[in-house]
Amino acid sequence: MSKVILKNKKAKSNLSRAKPSVSNPTLDTIKMVEQTLSKMSEYSSKNKLWRELPRQVQYPTFKAVLDYLEESNKIMYDKDGTIIWIFMDNPKLKRLYKTSKSLL
């Protein structure tokens, strides 16, 4: 009986030290990736964009940011894997959008 209890205690201590499989990106990290993407507007690969970032980010965190940006319709992927910035952040486009009339 005592051996079973000791094994369970060991298992609990190992679980508490385990790191999560995907780290959650901070707002600063998301903004940094957005700014880098919007400056160039397209990157031929994830790896190229990852290497162009001003500071280092773990690759799983970087992929989580890209997933978020794709879900929020800020980026899209071309057939060949090119990452394209599609978010409307141009002041002229924003003005045109506000002054345009709806067709429906």
Image: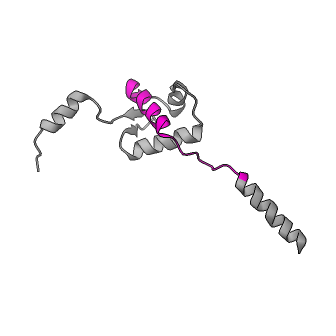
| Left-right relation of 72 to 9 | left
Query: Who is closer to the viewer here, 3 or 86?
Result: 3
User: How is the structure coloured here?
Assistant: one colour
- 21 magenta-colored: yes
33 left or right of 87?
right
Q: Position of residue 36 (x, y in %)?
A: 44, 27
Q: Quadrant of the N terminus?
A: bottom right
Relative to residue 6, is residue 69 depicted above or below?
above
Q: Tell me: residue 23, above or below residue 82.
A: below
Residue 103 percent location from the top left of the image: 10, 46
Q: Residue at x 44, y 45 (%)?
A: 68
Residue displayed at 78% across by 61% down:
11
In the rendered view, does 93 fall on the left or right side of 100? right
Where does residue 38 sit, x and y in percent of width and height? 38, 28
Residue occupying image coordinates x 58% and y 29% = 56
The image shows residue 83 at horizontal and vertical percentages of 43, 34
Q: Which residues are magenta?
A: 17-42
Q: Per the image, is 64 magenta? A: no
Q: Is residue 44 left or right of residue 103?
A: right
